[in-house]
């Protein structure tokens, strides 16, 4: 009986992943526990081992999207007739494990080449001894004007899925944080959002189809920009942590995210997402809901503006704009506005 080897469920069953490298050829004999492939979903990579002894067949093409939980190959106990062994090839200009062994390139360059579908054989290396660097690969990708392939196409498809499967509405409000905001805006916001969500369960949880499951505890994902793209690891139960603890956790997640070292557990269990573009000078925007959640909060730049104090005098005030995008299919406008007003009240003290 053939054994199916499945694309692991890294983010959510049904979401796409890709095989980024095969370490075996079609028809090759394998042993249980032998490393046979590397896969990725979003920015999380996992290695796949053979679940049993036999001969592999039906290898999916490198960089072809495969639903998480679906087969990527099978292991048969009988050998199959095949043509003379050739290296496993990639589609759309992708790279093969065999070619990577012949080309001198940094590990980061190889990873980016797989994600962008760039053939390292056609990239001129500028590193020592002609070594291909990550910058060389990105330069080749920028000059090729190639369509989205591999992991980047998976990310694009997931974003389009969010837009097509939700009824997004965005509400904005300006918060006066003159008397409350310190230097640590992001960890303070994450904690305050979690405290607010405790009283607004309609926005705190996950959906599956037309069913919404509210969460007992708020686990807040934070969008972090990396060279490879946007990731959103989770801060678990920030309402139970101090701002200092959250700040340290966010810094550690950001460091590992930019080093490409986040694991599937770092994304698991998120019930709400915060994304902060304030450092880019952005005031308000329309963030895209991070499925299977039903809401996301965008944070804008901290501004100094003229305002009127309680005595009627003009004074300098510090403000920021919050943009709440929610799925109107699950949350009505009034409850979403109540959440935003409650959050504003806590932030303003």
Image: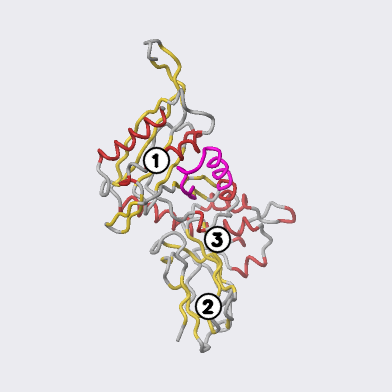
| Residue of label 1 | 297
Q: Main secondary structure of the magenta part?
A: helix
The label shown at residue 114 is: 3
Please report the residue visible at 29 percent of the width from the left and 42 percent of the height from the top. Answer: 169
**Which of the marked residues, 3 or 1, is nearer the chain's N terminus?**
3
Whole-percent x and y of residue 179?
46, 23
- Quadrant of residue 25 in the image? bottom right
Q: Secondary structure at mark 3?
A: helix
Which quadrant, please, contains the C terminus? top left
Which quadrant, please, contains the N terminus? bottom left
Q: Secondary structure at mark 2?
A: loop
Mark 3 neighbour class, 10 Å CA radius: few under 14, some 14 to 19, many 20 or more: many
The label shown at residue 51 is: 2
Whole-percent x and y of residue 192?
43, 37
**Which of the marked residues, 2 or 1, is nearer the chain's N terminus?**
2
Indicate how the structure is coloured in the image. secondary structure
**Which of the marked residues, 2 or 3, is nearer the chain's N terminus?**
2
The label shown at residue 135 is: none
The outermost residue toward the right is 129
Using the image as rendered, state which of residue 252 and residue 100 is in the foreground: 252
Mark 1 neighbour class, 10 Å CA radius: few under 14, some 14 to 19, many 20 or more: many
Please report the residue visible at 64 percent of the width from the left and 58 percent of the height from the top. Answer: 107
Q: In the rendered structure, which segment of residues is drawn in magenta?
A: 233-253
Magenta span contains residue 242:
yes
Please report the residue visible at 55 percent of the width from the left and 59 percent of the height from the top. Answer: 118
Whole-percent x and y of residue 39?
52, 65
Whole-percent x and y of residue 81?
52, 88
**Figure disc tally:** 3
Using the image as rendered, state which of residue 274 and residue 194 is in the foreground: 194
């Amino acid at each position: 009986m053939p054994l199916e080897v499945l694309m692991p469920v890294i983010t959510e069953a049904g979401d796409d992943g890709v095989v980024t490298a095969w370490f075996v050829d079609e028809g090759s004999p394998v042993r249980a526990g032998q490393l046979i492939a590397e896969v990725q979903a979003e920015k999380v990579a996992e290695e796949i081992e053979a679940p049993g002894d036999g001969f592999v067949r039906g290898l999916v093409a490198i960089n072809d999207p495969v639903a998480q939980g679906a087969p990527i190959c099978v292991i048969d106990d009988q050998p199959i007739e095949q043509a003379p062994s050739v290296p496993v090839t990639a589609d759309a200009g992708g790279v093969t494990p065999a070619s990577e062994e012949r080309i001198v390139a940094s590990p980061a360059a190889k990873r980016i080449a797989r994600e962008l579908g760039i053939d390292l054989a056609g990239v001129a290396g500028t590193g020592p001894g002609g070594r291909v660097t990550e910058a060389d690969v990105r330069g080749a990708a920028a000059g090729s004007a190639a369509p989205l392939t591999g992991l980047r196409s998976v990310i694009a498809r997931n974003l389009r899925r969010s837009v097509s499967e939700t009824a997004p509405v965005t509400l904005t409000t300006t918060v006066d944080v003159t008397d409350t905001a310190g230097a640590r805006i992001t960890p303070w916001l994450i904690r305050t959002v979690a405290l607010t969500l405790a009283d607004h369960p309609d926005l705190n949880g996950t959906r599956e189809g037309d069913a919404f499951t509210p969460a007992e505890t708020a686990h807040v994902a934070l969008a972090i920009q990396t060279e490879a793209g946007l990731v959103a690891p989770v801060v678990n139960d920030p309402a139970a942590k101090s701002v200092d603890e959250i700040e340290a956790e966010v810094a550690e997640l950001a460091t590992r995210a930019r080093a490409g070292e986040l694991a599937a557990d770092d994304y698991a269990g998120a019930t709400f997402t915060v994304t902060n573009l304030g450092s880019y000078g952005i005031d308000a925007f329309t963030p895209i809901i991070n499925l299977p959640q039903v809401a996301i909060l965008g944070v804008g730049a901290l501004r100094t503006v003229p305002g009127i104090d309680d005595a009627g005098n003009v004074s300098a005030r510090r403000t920021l704009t919050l943009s709440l995008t929610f799925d109107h299919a699950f949350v009505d406008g009034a409850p979403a506005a109540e959440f935003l007003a409650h959050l504003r009240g806590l932030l303003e003290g």
